[in-house]
Amino acid sequence: MLWVSAILLMLAGCSHTAEKVEYWMSYDDIELLASPSDTASVIEKKSGRVSPFEIEGRDSTGQWGRYKVSGGTFSKMVYGWFPLEEMIYAGSNDPEERLETYVVNAKDLPAYKHPKVNKKDCYFTLHQGDTVLATATSGSWIHIYYTKFGQTGRQREDYGWVQASQLQKIDSLTRDGLREQKLASSVTARAGGKEDAAYLEARQKHHKVYQSVAVVIGYIGMAIALGLLVFAIRRKKFWDVVVIFIMGLLIVGLSQAIEISAWYFAFFLPLMAYIVTYPLLYINKTSRLSTYVFPVLALLAVAGYLMMNTNILHPTFWRVLWFIVLAGACTVETFWIRNRKEKDICPHCGYYGKHTTDGREQTGSTTSYGTAKEDQYLNTTRETVGNTEYITKHYNRVTYDTKKTTRFYDVHRTCMHCGQPFLNFEESTTTSKTKRS
């Protein structure tokens, strides 16, 4: 489909970053100027921070860095200029740039915002064995770049000044090289030695495949949302495509952030299957088929991911239980989505849309009775014995008789395409309780 290809190209263009970006730090407040000159007007005063500014180019002298203030895609770009002599170089996005690499010798090594010892200036602490890249030097101090992966699989990047005497030079690495090194060590360290290293590496490779597919599907979702916008409006399903677009954005962003195999990644998979099968709803002959294809695709993807993530192929009680819990939760998610889509498909012509609702009528009900116990708060007493005060809260256990009623309804609807009437089925449950005397 040409329109899908065109939109994907547009989205790729929107997400494209500058060909060369340099990272520069300013831990102190710094002025952003309108042009590369000391006499230029000030656009704004930027607060000092522990994350780098992205410099997208330099002036002819190389002393000023161009920084994007705002704009892009659909609005005019606004740029400002930083005096680089007042900043600290922190590397670039050049995959070929190699930086001197050091390992930390000290048990604990504080990293400061400035090249001097000041406890109030300490930003974070490195530990013995940590590997860092050197981006700048000042006397006996080295400005370093450090990265690691947290428990959620997200990458964290830190910068700071450390004493050179506490470091030992070992090699030179690129930023990507250090990142891959830390990712690999993080993967095997997360299990604390409880899992075989070969399995953990295989699980990580498996996750990377899912991660790559997720990013592609996220972009496809945004393209589908834009491509079906007019059709969705005609069918009164505008909010459908808004949700699809938002889902695409979230899947792209979060999938790229979750770089280590994680159980909660499985909950993205039904959303990805929904995006892929959503266009089938707009073809009358395949709309009903989508309500079967979607859950099958979603659950197969979930099962494939969780089998590796939980190591279910080498079962233990806890692995099996964890697999069942996660798979069950993803199944609930999948069929919740499916049921919301299925009710808007005309059973006569297969047209998907927000059909007219002509009221509903109750067709039956069921009632069940039971009991429930609750602890009802009474009061709090305080007693002092010696230098210790004992606080006791008192409760009274109360028994209730419960009544649970489920009502069933026929919802009368008329197809907005063929005009034929059809029924949806709904139910609602209410629970009441009466305190026993």
Image (cartoon, rainbow, N blue to C red):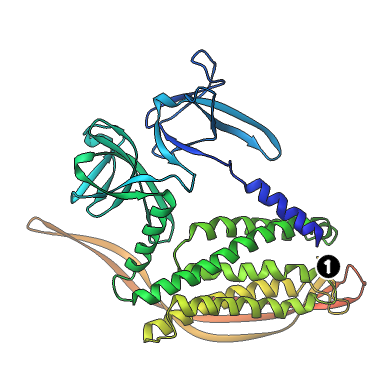
Q: Position of residue 197 (x, y in %)?
A: 35, 74
Residue 327 vertical placement versus 8 (above, below): below
Residue at point 44% right, 74% down? Answer: 202
Residue 199 vertical placement versus 137 (above, below): below
Q: Position of residue 376 (x, y in %)?
A: 37, 70
Position of residue 141 in the picture relative to residue 347 (left or right): left
Report the quarter where the N terminus lies: bottom right
Q: Is residue 238 visible?
A: no
- Callout 1 amino acid: His
Residue 404 vertical placement versus 68 (above, below): below
- Quarter occupied by residue 339: bottom right
Q: What element does badge 1 sit on?
A: loop
Query: For mark 1, what is the residue?
Result: 355
Q: What is the count of numbered marks? A: 1
Residue at point 79% right, 56% down? Answer: 229
Residue at point 54% right, 65% down? Answer: 211
Observer-nearest of 401 and 222: 222
The residue furthest left is 386
